Image (cartoon, rainbow, N blue to C red):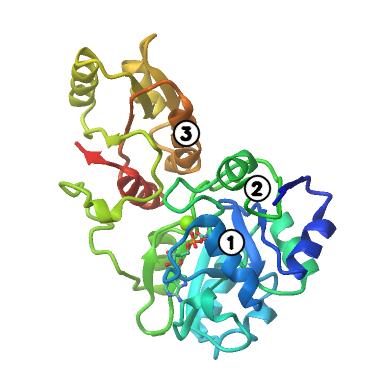
Amino acid sequence: MQTDFLDSNQLDQASKYLKNGEVVAFPTETVYGLGADATNEKAVKKIFQAKGRPSDNPLIIHISSVEQLEQYVQSVPDIAKTVISHFWPGPCTLILNKKGPIATSVTGGLDTIAVRMPDHPIALKLIEKSGVPLAAPSANTSGKPSPTDASHVKKDLDGKIRAILDGGRTGIGLESTVLDLTDPHKPTILRPGGVTFEELEDILGTVFESNPTLKDSSAPKSPGMKYKHYSPVKPVWILPTQLDLAKAIVNQLESDGETIGLLTSDDWLDELKTDQRKCYSLGKKDTPQQAAARLFYSLRKLDDEKVSMIMVEPYKKKGIGAAYMNRLEKAATRIL
Ligand code: TXA
Ligand code: MG
């Protein structure tokens, strides 16, 4: 199949493809999504095929208005209305009890459904023009870092999908927060993301997390292989939190013959930069949103560089730093 590379003026063409049951990648404020008509079983199956995604991992449906939500969930509890009024459109996906004509493979047979309204003009127009909710996972090959640029989608999925709508680089750079509201008394974060734990706690009072280690500032000792995800081809190691120790380890690895790609804050780069190291910046240490925005982008860049391994600085698991560390720990082959 030939993949069309469309500019943002070619929304009509993209929506035609979607109405015809084809799969189209499009930009959102978080990462690029791989969209298909969520009411069309055959179309949704094409998403799983193109990505090589296991069929038991359910998809998020993307809508362009709050009214649309009522067609696909049994009820909208007050707590959902509160979250929506603060964070929609935006990077907050809600899990609610499903209803309506959604293809079975979107939810993998679950009674619940994940819904979000993206905060991106191209995504919103595309959903409106298509006239259907769009089921869309991140537009990467399963297991790879999520795409934050149209060129990443092309690299992973060219020839496997009908079109890519190019909207430039995405702003947030990692995925939405997934918030389970099926028990309205127990709002639970299933995946940290663009809306932070603290922001949700501010408006909801108490918020739960499905992963109890999320706010634990000490890194787990070893990430099990089963958590490997978002991974470049090259090994990714998370550096220790002390700069001196990090420096010693990088020096040692180089004398053992490794070629190191570094991804750290500017503060650390000043200390670690040398001519032989490939260095990418995560921005200032006190702006974790920059680190979040650059993580997947830079992992892909470093994977294409002539380096034998990639070493990344850890950030505090606070605010968006929690989402940054969640993705980094899943990408990592080793945590120092
Ligand atoms: O920012 C994002 O959320 C991006 C953009 C494209 O919108 N999408 C995205 O989709 O990250 P994906 O498929 O890569 O991640 C969807 C997450 C998965 O962790 C999935 O397990 C969870 O949402 N999910 C989907 N439906 C669910 C459900 N009914 N119950 C629990 N978790 C669900
Ligand atoms: Mg994904």
Which is nearer the N-term, disc 1 or disc 2? 1
Q: Is mark 2 within 8 Å of ligand 2?
A: no
| Residue 194 in sight in this render | no
Which of the two residues, 89 or 250, is positioned nearer the viewer here? 250
Proximity of marks 1 and 2: CB atoms separated by less than 8 Å: no
Residue depicted at 77% across the width and 74% down the height: 131
> Is residue 126 among the parts visible in the rendering?
yes
The x and y percentages for residue 86 are 56, 68
Is 78 situated above or below 200? below
| Residue 122 in picture, x, y percent from top left | 73, 55
Q: CA distance from mark 1 to mark 2?
A: 30 Å
The amino acid beneath tag 3 is Ser
Where residue 328 appears, as percent x and y from the top left, is 35, 44
186 vs 51, nearest the viewer: 51
Relative vertical location of residue 82 with respect to residue 10 in this rendering, above or below: below
Secondary structure, mark 3, is: helix
The mark nearer the N terminus, 2 or 3, is 2
Mark 1 Cα shell of 10 Å, populated few (<14), some (14-19), many (≥20): many
> Quick one: SS at disc 1?
loop
Give the residue displayed 27% in from the left and 41% down from the top: 333
Q: Which residue is mark 1?
A: 90
From the top left corner, tell me how far across and down residue 336 is, in percent: 19, 36
Using the rendered view, name the quadrant where residue 188 is placed.
Answer: bottom left
Instruction: Please name the residue that numbered disc 3 is placed on.
Output: 298
